[in-house]
Image (cartoon, rainbow, N blue to C red):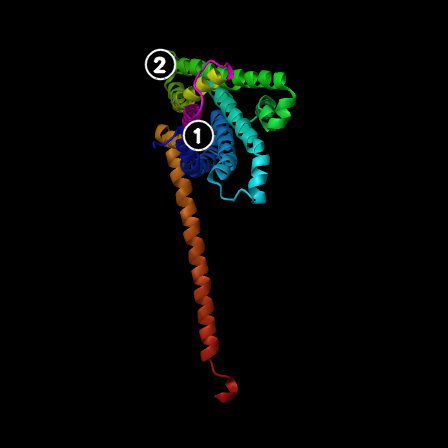
Amino acid sequence: MGITGVEVATFIYAYVLPCQVLIGCCGNIMNLIVLLDRQMRKARTHLLFAAMALSDLAFLISSLGTWLMIQRFFPPSQPMMDFLKNHRHYPNGLCNWFSAMSIYFMIYATAERVSVIKSPFRASKEPVTARFAASLLLISVVSLAICGIHFMSHQQRKLWPDLQRSWIMAQMLLVVVVPFVLTTFMNAMLIVELKKNRCQMHALSDNYSEKQILQDNKRSRDERKITIMVVVISTSFIVCNAPGAVIYTLKVFELTKLTGGFTHLIETISNCLAVTGKVLNFFLFCSSSQRFRKLLRIRLENWRYCRSSKYARRSSSKLNHSHSQANRTLSMPMTEL
């Protein structure tokens, strides 16, 4: 008897997903440490990437609820297993909410790069403003409203079948189809604008002083590096989320005739690929940004130095304590001399 699609899907959820969660959590924590550095906070795009990393980290942690149910750490009679079954829609809702937030932050970062690369000398000098903070909060609230259907249990959804279908279709359009099309279009615009911007910088060299040319060239190089990072991250997003977007769209519109274990396997593989995209962001940051690698190396060296210094102080205190004990033991009272 061969291996069924359900068994393969169960294997992926039980053994591949925890590895992805572990690597992804470590990578996104590293992303937050570097992207929230004082030097990196000067660019708004880095703050958006930090918000995306935080959303991805929360998504990966929420995925542990699904992993616990698949792994079956608890026997069916255990109250914990019953609790997970009765409340499994909550981790599912959190996963959809954090995934939508990450997608919208990706669109925001790409759109911000498009505006900057079109006008490289009019970039905002204040990355954090009240409007920017309000926009991040608005994205979080809108994402929650769009994905709110997933926080309802199966019994609650049966009470409003028409509302459920309309809500799911709206989520599919606003979280899957429209972001995918927008990201693909803006990513193509960034690639074209990068080539145009290089030609414009060569043309401006005849109209500015040498000092102004050096300043503008340095700023343009910095903006280009950030934009290249955005192109790499957005391309990875498109590649990793394209299969899931197609499958989810076909499923919502009931355009596929595949049923049973094979459909479950295809959905599991597409979900695994989407999670892989969240795991790859750290490696893509390292490969596409020399500044990211440098700051990460400095952070790790400082952390290792702090640990070694703390260990040295602790060893020194223990040594001094042992010496004091030895001196106290070997010393003779004055009355015995």
Residues drawn in magenta: 252-276
Find residue 41 and name its label.
Answer: none
Is residue 132 in the magenta section?
Answer: no
Residue found at the far bottom of this picture: 336
Image x and y of residue 94, in percent: 56, 31
The residue carrying pointer 2 sits among few (fewer than 14), some (14 to 19) or many (20 or more) residues within 10 Å by Cα, namely: few
- Residue drawn at x 55%, y 16% is 169
Image check: 83 left or right of 33? right
SS assignment for the magenta stretch, majority: helix
Instruction: Please identify, in this view, whether the residue under mark 2 or under mark 1 is nearer the observer.
Output: 1
Q: Let me know if residue 119 appears in the view.
A: no
Residue found at the far right of this picture: 159
**Type of residue at label 2?**
Lys
Read off the residue under disc 2: 195
The Cα–Cα distance between marks 2 and 1, rounded to whole angstroms, is: 32 Å
- Residue drawn at x 45%, y 64% is 318
Viewer-nearest residue: 203 or 223: 223
Which comes sooner in the sequence, label 2 or label 1? Answer: 2
Q: Let me know if residue 146 appears in the view.
A: yes
Q: Quadrant of the N terminus?
A: top left
Viewer-nearest residue: 145 or 135: 145
Q: Are discs 2 and 1 less than 8 Å apart at CB?
A: no
Image x and y of residue 146, in percent: 58, 21
Residue found at the far front of this picture: 1
Read off the residue under disc 1: 275
* Numbered marks: total: 2
Q: Secondary structure at mark 1?
A: helix
Give residue 281's quadrant in the image: top left
Viewer-nearest residue: 77 or 98: 77
Image x and y of residue 251, in percent: 48, 18
